[in-house]
Amino acid sequence: RVAVLDFGAQYGQLIARRIRDLKVYSEIVPGDISATELAALKPSAVILSGGPASVYAEDAPQVDPGVFELGVPVLGFCYGQQAMAVALGGEVGHTEKGEYGGVQIELAGHSRLLEGTPQQQTVWMSHRDAVTRAPEGFTITSRTSTCPVASMECPERGLYATQFHPEVRHSAHGNQMLQNFLFDICGLTPSWTMNSIIDDSVAAIRAQVGDARVILGLSGGVDSSVVAALCARAIGKQLTCVFVNHGLLRKNEPEEVEEVFTRQFDVDFVHVHAEERYEQLLAGITDPEEKRRIIGSQFWNEFFAVAQDLDGVRFLAQGTIYPDIIESGARKTGGKASTIKSHHNLIPFPEGVHFDLIEPLDHFFKDEVRALGTALGLPDHIVHRQPFPGPGLAIRIIGAVDREKLTVLKEADAIVREELDAYNERLFRETGERNGEGSVWQYFAVLPDVRSVGVMGDERTYARPVILRAVESSDAMTADWAKLPYEVLTRISGRIVAEVPGVNRVAYDITSKPPATIEWE
Ligand code: XMP
């Protein structure tokens, strides 16, 4: 494996992704990990990430100098180069002006890292500090007009570093450099493929579980579905999937989930029909946070009611994914225990009840989870499912939830999805890219708590409006409203008013996030 020492999370994740894209397994560890802890992970290569700090800042993360003595090749980027230089007796100073964005470098002499890349090329820089004197034994392998050491290396000791960011796509030959490092310098092979991942995961689940029973809360979402498919492959009928149907999923979703897991994967499937209990609990509740709280805590009531009735359950499988782990303080990577805010604590085990957790996806990024799902045979409508909130349609009905409103929203939402799925699919066929330029990331209908006047046929109506929400985003942190073609909007509006009884108007939400959020509640 390749260990990425992380000095500023954003960069660390991107580097880990690039290496994995080259079919080499990589893992992120905290930048200040000790050389002994790092050695225990037995890495075949070490990468020092960039980071926002200045190496001379008081609280700057330091790299343990022992890391350079492990006998494992080390490659540093940006802050990583500076940290390497300082640790090995070189110097770092302010350059007269910083370099930000695309910059030209000029190669200087032979370099194993830059081998096969052009004499002059564009790389991506973002720095003010720079190495001003390379440590003894290092060769300077490229420069820019302001940066005297754009890259340096000491092949005898297996040490390589760049001031620029080869992991960023704008560095035209960055990928070549990563390949040089991984395959030529470290002698690794690109063997981390979907098949090897599945084989390893299946073996690990079998070893952990033995002949015990495993229970899993299936939501219909990507992560829990992929865990279910993986566990089904590993332990078959020893897995019980509990699907708590709160009645707040979209049209046809409960049936689709049941169909996939009973027909295709043949697991022990428990469909808990909790629709009426949820209906009663939510009656008259208008506060969004109160709705969330009720829905969340009732889920665990329903789930544990089933779990406690089953014999021999020792494990609870969960769809925790790698970014959850990184964000919660690098739990399994020797990170600082004090920062760990494990979501395990969020499972409200009832008095006297405890299950050990299995989290087979805890080393994967979201799109790797999707690829895993596809390789395991899950259908596209699950693997490429758009984000959907746990509290479901309850937070898309403004005000109190009732059966009649749920029916209206489900029907309207089904039309929105049908039309925009088709729109995205058209773009995908044209561009070959999912979630590329112009495509819609999340789209749904919202039912506000108002009525408006309309005229249908010769009659005055006083009925509900439906709000269309469709956004472009990559991570839900920020989003922009989708600039949908007028004919698509016209079609959606026309179909909803014609096909959904009780709706006489459609409005389009043209607000970005911020200031609005994606959901209405
Ligand atoms: P907002 O509305 O905050 O949503 O812009 C950001 C993303 O999170 C989803 N979302 C939720 N997901 N439970 C969830 O599991 C929730 O309570 C919840 N609220 C919002 C939302 O769909 C969007 O993708």
Image (spheres, grey):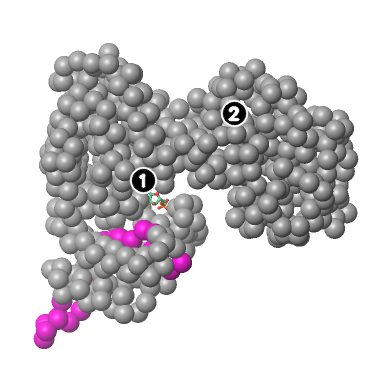
Horizontal side, residue 296 vs residue 245: left or right = right
* Quadrant location of the N terminus in the rendered image: top right
Q: With respect to residue 19, does 461 lie above or below?
A: below
Question: Does the residue tagged 1 have its C-beta within 8 Å of any atom of ligand 1?
Answer: no
Highlighted magenta segment, given as a residue range: 437-462
Q: Which mark is residue 44?
A: 2
Q: Nearer the viewer, residue 325 or 37?
A: 37
Q: Position of residue 9 (x, y in %)?
A: 59, 40
Residue that extends furthest to the bottom in the rendered view of this protein? 458
Q: Residue at x 23, y 31 (%)?
A: 232
Q: Are marks 1 and 2 in contact (CB under 8 Å)?
A: no
Judge whether residue 259 can be spotted in this image. Answer: yes
Foreground mark, 1 or 2?
2
Mark 1: secondary structure: helix
Counting residues from the start of the chain, the first of labels 1 and 2 encountered is 2
Mark 1 Cα-neighbour bin, 10 Å: few <14, some 14–19, many ≥20: many
Q: CA distance from mark 1 to mark 2?
A: 27 Å
Q: With respect to residue 286, does 184 lie above or below?
A: above
Q: Residue at x 19, y 15 (%)?
A: 312
Q: Position of residue 69 (x, y in %)?
A: 73, 22
495 inside magenta stretch: no
Q: Amino acid at mark 2?
A: Ser
Horizontal side, residue 111 vs residue 204: left or right = right
Q: Nearer the viewer, residue 233 or 463?
A: 233
Residue 269, picture quadrant: top left
Q: Amino acid at mark 1?
A: Arg
Residue assigned mark 1: 370
